[in-house]
Amino acid sequence: KYPKKMSIYGFGSVGRAFYSKIKEYCIVEQFIDRQPKCKFFFGVALHTIDCANVNKNTFIVVIPTYDFENIVQEIKSIHTDVLVENIVKFEDFVGTGKVKYNEF
């Protein structure tokens, strides 16, 4: 029920904690962050939005959901082929049952 691959938008403490759990179920291709503080995290690349490897097949979980609409617009303005339905809020991803809440 998990996507085979995903990108995580947000490299704060919640994004890193989410990665530590989800990496057991799917491949995390990259972290996307407005101001990445390093280039790699346990072998996973960190990119700014404009340098991210995003296309129509990219599934993105957005951690900072308080700014979700702006983040989606920013991603879409740079990566015009991305599918908006493949960009989801962290809470929605967890709430769909794809990840059990108690794993966090």
Image (spheres, grey):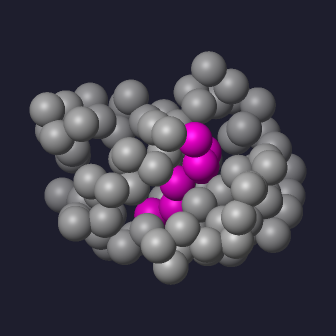
In the image, residue 44 sits, relative to residue 47, either above or below, namely below
Could you tell me residue 3's position as x and y percent?
32, 63
Q: Nearer the viewer, residue 57 or 14?
A: 14
Name the residue: 50% across, 79% down: 43
Frontmost residue, 26 versus 102:
102
Name the image quarter holding the C terminus: top left
Question: Number of numbered discs present?
Answer: 0
Q: Residue at x 50, y 39 (%)?
A: 13
Outermost residue to the top: 66
Q: Give x and y (percent) for residue 14.
A: 46, 38
Viewed as shown, does residue 44 lie left or right of 21?
Answer: right
Question: Image check: 7 left or right of 20?
Answer: right
Q: On the image, which quarter does residue 79 sit in?
A: bottom right
Q: Locate the N terminus and report the quarter of the image it occupies.
A: bottom left
Is any atom of residue 73 visible in this view?
A: yes
Give the image location of residue 91, x and y in percent: 39, 28
Q: Is residue 58 above or below residue 33?
A: below
- Residue segment shown in magenta: 6-12
Magenta segment includes 90: no
Residue 96 visible to the viewer: no
* Side (left or right) of 100 relative to 26: left
Residue at image point 17% right, 40% down: 103
Who's the residue at 53% across and 74% down the image? 44
Q: Is 36 left, or right, of 30 in this rendering?
A: right
Spot occupied by residue 102 in the image (x, y as percentages of width and height): 14, 32
